[in-house]
Image (tube, grey):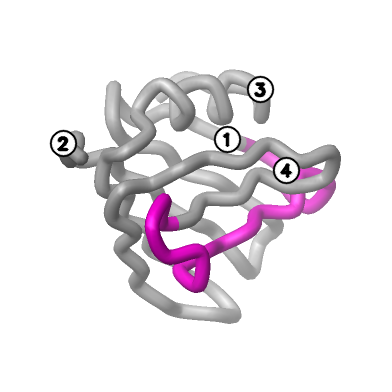
Amino acid sequence: MKKITVKELGKTLEENKNSTIKILLEGTINYNLEIDNAKIINEPNYISICNFKDRKQTIKFNIHQIMKIEQMDKEKFKINFDLLQTAQLKIQEKNIA
């Protein structure tokens, strides 16, 4: 595992647009989310991941709440917000649209 910055995470996600991104939230909130045809929107305070065709499927990560980002391998990332909440992201195959 290596530590990366928010910019590096955003760049990697942007390079893999139209992929399926699986998100596992663990901690205060436990939730599994899978976003197909992912589009990354870099906003001043957020990294948003949404479905390119259906914007209702959106998750926003507040950049100011992120304490640490680790790249576990080429396609997996772990984001620590605090001791009570983490998110794991996994990039899967690109969808041809």
How far separated are the C-alphas under marks 3 and 1?
11 Å
Q: Where residue 87 sits in the image (x, y, percent)?
A: 49, 56
Judged left or right of residue 20, residue 63 is right
> Looking at the picture, which amino acid does disc 2 mark?
Ile
Name the one closer to the observer, 82 or 65: 65
Residue 43, picture quadrant? top right
Q: Nearer the viewer, mark 3 or mark 2?
A: 2
Mark 3 vs 1, N-terminal side: 3
Mark 4 vs 2, N-terminal side: 4
User: Disc 2 marks which residue?
Assistant: 96
Q: Are marks 3 and 1 in contact (CB under 8 Å)?
A: no
Q: Where residue 91 sits in the image (x, y, percent)?
A: 28, 39
Mark 4 vs 3, N-terminal side: 3
User: Disc 4 marks which residue?
Assistant: 67
User: Disc 3 marks which residue?
Assistant: 7
User: Which contiguous range is marked in magenta?
Assistant: 51-68
- The quarter of the picture where the N terminus appears is top left
Q: How crowded is mark 3: few (under 14 residues within 10 Å), some or many (20 or more)?
A: few
User: Disc 1 marks which residue?
Assistant: 69
Name the one closer to the observer, 83 or 92: 92
- The quarter of the picture where the C terminus appears is top left
Mark 2 vs 1, N-terminal side: 1
Query: From what the image shows, is residue 67 above or below residue 73?
Result: below
